Amino acid sequence: MSLSELDRLLERRRHDPDLAEKLREPMDLEAFLALASEYGCDVTETDVIAAQQRELSGQAAAELQRQQAVDSRRLRSFIQG
């Protein structure tokens, strides 16, 4: 697993304005993995999921519930029924 590679890429954006700008734009997973590869980082889908889980495990229950509510509202407005 190359979770450390992902951390290295995300740390690099602090010192690389071009990378920071690219990461501000929404992108799908394939585009993100290609960008990581472009910057010499061997990042996989598994690494991205592990990083998301790591991020979520550090959040308080109230914050997780708030985020779920935001996501739920987005889905309700997307799925008309």
Image (cartoon, grey):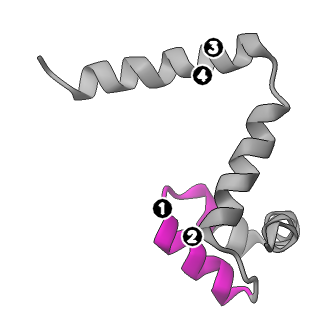
Please give the residue where the numbered disc 1 appears in the rendered image. 27
For image coordinates 80% across by 63% down, the residue present is 10
Query: Residue 46, percent across and down?
Result: 65, 64
Tell me the amino acid under the disc marked 3.
Gln
Q: Are marks 3 and 4 in contact (CB under 8 Å)?
A: yes
Q: CA distance from mark 1 to mark 4?
A: 20 Å
Residue 9 occupies quadrant: bottom right
For image coordinates 80% across by 44% down, the residue present is 54
Please give the residue where the numbered disc 4 appears in the rendered image. 67
Please give the residue where the numbered disc 3 appears in the rendered image. 65
Query: Residue 34, percent across and down?
Result: 56, 81
For image coordinates 65% across by 86% down, the residue present is 37
Above or below for 41 versus 6? below
State which tag comes first along the sequence, 2 or 4. 2
What range is drawn magenta here? 22-39
Q: CA distance from mark 2 to mark 3?
A: 27 Å
Residue 15 occupies quadrant: bottom right
Please give the residue where the numbered disc 2 appears in the rendered image. 32
Above or below for 72 versus 50? above
State which tag comes first along the sequence, 1 or 2. 1
> From the image, which quarter does the C terminus lie in?
top left
